[in-house]
Amino acid sequence: MTSTGSTGADRQRIAEETVAAMRAADRAARAAGVEVTEVAPGRAVATMTVGEDHANGHGVCHGGYLFLLADTAMAYACNAHGISALATGADIAFLRPARTGDVLTAEATERALAGRSGLYDVTVRTGDGTVVAELRGRSRQIPGLAPPPAP
């Protein structure tokens, strides 16, 4: 047991249950084709296949969709503690274009959790491991904020 009285298995169960509840109500991520594939307290992995509807005027993935993917991974990572949290800000660096058909993976990792404030790094990669974008995000836990009911 940890000092909070929870075992690792308890924390993992809480992370999985929290993400399942959030996922049921997350219309934006579903509409964009984002899937959450892994979750643990302070960590999440999300994937998205770049479709033709994700392309900008240059024929590459629109930065807004890259941000949505990275932000979704961060959202699930910071909420996986079982306490509702919202992003308070994020900065993203677009390093390389992603193309139609690319399967993107965003891995979010908690770097710090101080009181109710969190700091997260998210790396977005293509299937061959090429880094497409890096996001650094900040969160704030809002106890008592419940996700909306599932549609």
Image: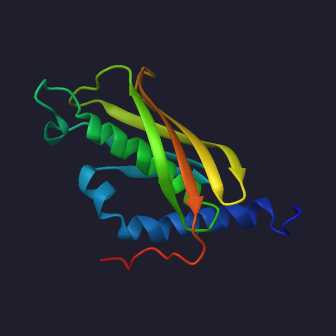
Camera-nearest residue between 39 and 88: 88
Front residue of 126 and 42: 42
Figure disc tally = 0
Q: Quadrant of the N terminus?
A: bottom right
Q: Return the x and y of residue 88 as percentages of the image width and height.
A: 49, 53
- For residue 17, above or below residue 131: below
Is there any visible trace of residue 140 in the rendered image? yes
Q: Is residue 45 left or right of residue 8?
A: left
Coordinates of residue 71 in the picture (x, y in percent): 42, 47
User: In which quadrant is the C terminus drawn?
Assistant: bottom left
Visual colour scheme: rainbow
Q: Going 52% across and 43% down the picture, which residue do you hit?
A: 137
Residue 86 coordinates in the image, percent (x, y): 50, 60
Q: Residue at x 69, y 51 (%)?
A: 113
Could you tell me residue 147's position as x and y percent? 45, 73
| Residue found farthest to the left | 57
Nearest the camera: 92 or 41?
A: 92
